[in-house]
Image: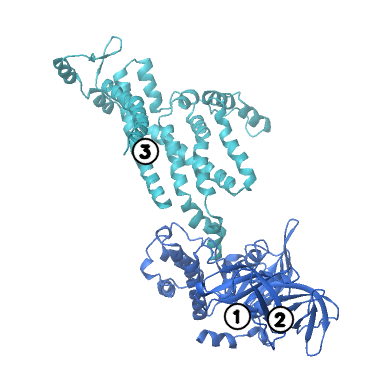
């Protein structure tokens, strides 16, 4: 390997080291520390230029106390579980809505497709925060949705949606739908049309051709889409705090409260470490899927 | 050798009592304003290897998709075995298709690809493995049964596609440019394999191709198409030797055209007055041609003999000058100039090695051919 190639590889690696590994090390360090009334609010602290005795003393002071605390308090357990539930259900709903949209896009006349893709991407041009705020306006008791439903006479009084888990599901599905649509669209679009024709030629009805050919062949797109929705949804903070109620338990919200309300940096850090461990499993699965896919295509 | 004999006997289209397996009756197919097939009628007989030949956009693929059921005709009937199949969906037709892209299911292995159609049929589950094995043996794919399509070569994929489309023993097999993706050598081998399999299974094959050599090799009859119409349907040798139009003569193989006026003699003999001060060409025609009509004399380059001495006792003798020689290994094509300035091609086999070649550039030579060597086209 020559020098220029080594330098080229150095770019992504240094990016990872500076922006991921070092911050992760700092968070890990804080998670093993104890809370203290100081700035920053934890102990022990370590100067970079310390003697070896000081280093040893420092490491002796670190412990797993915060993790033990997390495992003992039901709140965290419930919050993790509820986050997993909300993220999984949202992913499923996103898939159920996103697949037909992606299918319709892939089957549409070719000259329409760029426009349709543009329409899927267009919401990203507006700030994420503003779009979630807009949902508050839509879903509130006096919001457009309730006004419309009352006007049509379907309901008499307003539906209470805002500040419930319903609003959180709506928010997550809305915000992450494009991440589901685009990979599924990509896998459907590159599929050879003659495969479905061949299936029909060999005796399949249109429905069975879909389940036997189209669905299995779009699996990589489905898996990619599910991970792209599930992973950020699991740690989502903005949507549950703006649209969810006081009973909406999501780990992102808990983390925020530990960090800013309780100023308990060590516990907040350990919450973050466990969340990361929870996410690493699906990420590894995701990467393995990508790898397998690439081998098939080669 | 055996093949040759079978071919001379197998001529159901000449037998008026034979019923065709497929009949196109005045079929028209329009896509919006564009007419892909225009009022086309065609009979194809059982056990035929029928080739649809034409340039891209001539409607041959549309014709095949009409047979498979992926398109419905705008007008007319398509009859398969006495039943009008226009309203039968593709999955209910006893017709299978081998796609140009092969359309092998990438997530299924070779075995499951071949079994796919059988599993959707009424066939007894227990009989499926036997049938698949039979197909694997027929196409010499037994060792590859567990491989996925991306793990085998292009030629092997082509055989899987063939085995899959034959597995259900269809009444009719459609092949859409089946050898288009193969390299030339493999294509030649596969052509013979296809003929062999067609004969073994006794299935009626309809092949779509733009490769005239391929159509000539495999087919019992060839239909030459142009702009949604069939120009000529005949056996390969008739298509080559007695094309019915300039279009067919030009599309199949190499040809020289000479325009002229007819002058009828006795015994089907016709004089072609083609240039002032030149002796007329003597030809024959089975068709009735009017005296003094505008005609085109067509002659294949290999029917023309080149010599230094003026040949005697031959109907047509002309002078020519060699402009260019295309050396093709087994044969050479000589590009010549007639005394009138017209270009003319002649072919000769290279019986001598190239360093001993008799004719060279700018040689004045004699060109000669018999009175039956060419065709007179009246259009």
The reply to whether dot 2 and dot 3 touch (C-beta < 8 Å) is no
The N terminus of chain A: image quadrant: top left
| Few, some or many residues within 10 Å of mark 3 (<14, 14–19, 20+) | some
**In the visual, does A232 lie left or right of B268?**
left
Whether labels 2 and 1 share one chain: yes
User: Which of these two is toward me, A207 or B170?
Assistant: B170
Mark 1, residue position: B46
Residue B332: image x %, image y %? Answer: 57, 72
| Mark 3 secondary-structure assignment | helix
Residue B201: image x %, image y %? Answer: 50, 79
**Mark number, residue B317:** 2
The Cα–Cα distance between marks 1 and 3, rounded to whole angstroms, is: 59 Å
Residue B199: image x %, image y %? Answer: 52, 80
Residue extending farthest bottom:
B267
Q: Relative to B340, is B13 above or below? A: below
Q: Relative to B3, is A72 above or below? A: above
User: Which of these two is toward me, A199 or A139?
Assistant: A199
Chain letter of disc 2? B
Whether labels 2 and 3 share one chain: no
Colour in which the image shows chain A: cyan
The Cα–Cα distance between marks 2 and 1, rounded to whole angstroms, is: 46 Å
| Few, some or many residues within 10 Å of mark 2 (<14, 14–19, 20+) | many
Mark 3, residue position: A283
The Cα–Cα distance between marks 2 and 3, rounded to whole angstroms, is: 83 Å
Chain letter of disc 1? B
Going 48% across and 57% down the picture, which residue do you hit?
A212
């Amino acid at each position: 390997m020559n020098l220029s190639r080594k330098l080229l590889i150095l770019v992504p690696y240094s990016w990872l080291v500076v922006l991921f590994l070092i911050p992760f090390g700092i968070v890990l360090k804080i998670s093993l520390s104890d809370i203290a009334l100081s700035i920053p609010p934890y102990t022990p602290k370590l100067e970079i230029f310390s003697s070896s005795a000081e280093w040893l003393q420092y490491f002796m002071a670190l412990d797993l106390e915060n993790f033990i605390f997390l495992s003992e308090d039901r709140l965290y357990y419930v919050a993790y579980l509820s986050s997993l539930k909300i993220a999984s259900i949202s992913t499923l709903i996103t898939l159920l809505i996103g697949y037909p949209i992606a299918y319709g896009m892939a089957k549409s006349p070719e000259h329409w497709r760029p426009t349709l893709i543009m329409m899927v991407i267009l919401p990203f041009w507006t700030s994420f925060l503003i779009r979630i705020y807009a949902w508050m306006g839509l879903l509130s008791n006096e919001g457009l949705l309730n006004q419309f439903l009352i006007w049509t006479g379907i309901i008499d009084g307003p539906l209470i949606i805002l500040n419930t888990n319903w609003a959180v599901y709506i928010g997550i599905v809305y915000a992450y739908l494009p991440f589901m649509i685009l990979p599924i669209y990509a896998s459907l679009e590159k599929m050879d049309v003659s495969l479905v024709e061949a299936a029909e030629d060999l005796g399949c009805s249109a429905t069975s051709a879909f389940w036997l050919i189209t669905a299995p062949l779009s699996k990589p797109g489905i898996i990619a889409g599910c991970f792209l929705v599930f992973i950020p949804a699991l740690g989502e903070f903005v949507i549950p705090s703006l649209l969810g109620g006081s009973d909406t338990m999501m780990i992102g919200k808990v983390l925020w409260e530990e960090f800013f309300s309780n100023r308990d940096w060590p516990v907040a850090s350990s919450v973050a470490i466990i969340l990361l461990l929870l996410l690493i499993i699906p990420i590894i699965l995701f990467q393995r899927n990508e790898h397998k896919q690439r081998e098939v295509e080669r | 050798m055996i093949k040759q004999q079978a071919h001379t006997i197998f001529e159901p289209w000449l037998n008026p009592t034979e019923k065709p397996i497929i009949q196109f009756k005045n079929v028209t197919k329009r896509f919006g304003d564009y007419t892909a097939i225009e009022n086309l009628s065609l009979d194809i007989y059982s056990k035929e290897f029928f080739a649809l030949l034409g340039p891209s956009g001539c409607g041959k693929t549309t014709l095949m998709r009409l047979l498979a059921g992926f398109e419905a005709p705008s007008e007319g009937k398509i009859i398969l075995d006495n039943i009008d199949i226009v309203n039968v969906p593709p999955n209910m037709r006893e017709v299978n298709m081998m796609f140009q892209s092969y359309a092998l299911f990438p997530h299924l292995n070779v075995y499951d690809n071949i079994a796919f159609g059988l599993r959707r049929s009424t066939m007894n589950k227990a009989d499926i493995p036997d049938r698949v094995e039979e197909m694997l043996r027929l196409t010499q794919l037994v060792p590859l049964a567990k491989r996925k399509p991306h793990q085998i070569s292009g030629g092997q994929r082509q055989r899987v596609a063939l085995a899959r489309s034959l597995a259900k023993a269809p009444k009719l097999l459609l092949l859409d440019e089946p050898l288009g993706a193969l390299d030339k050598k493999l294509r030649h081998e596969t052509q013979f394999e296809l003929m062999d399999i067609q004969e073994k299974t006794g299935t009626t094959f309809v092949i779509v191709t733009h490769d005239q050599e391929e159509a000539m090799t495999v087919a019992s009859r060839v239909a030459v198409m142009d702009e949604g119409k069939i120009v000529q349907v005949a056996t390969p040798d008739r298509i080559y030797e007695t094309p019915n139009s300039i279009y067919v003569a030009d599309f199949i193989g190499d040809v020289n055209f000479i325009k002229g006026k007819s002058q009828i003699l006795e015994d089907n003999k016709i004089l072609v007055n083609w240039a002032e001060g030149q002796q007329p060409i003597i030809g024959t025609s089975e068709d009735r041609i009017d005296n003094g009509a505008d005609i085109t004399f067509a002659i294949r380059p290999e029917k023309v003999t080149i010599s230094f001495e003026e040949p005697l006792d031959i109907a047509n003798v002309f002078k020519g000058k060699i402009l260019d020689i295309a050396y093709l290994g087994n044969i050479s094509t000589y590009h010549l100039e007639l005394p009138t300035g017209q270009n003319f091609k002649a072919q000769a086999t290279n019986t001598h090695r190239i360093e001993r070649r008799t004719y060279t550039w700018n040689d004045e030579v004699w060109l000669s051919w018999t009175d039956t060597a060419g065709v007179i086209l009246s259009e």
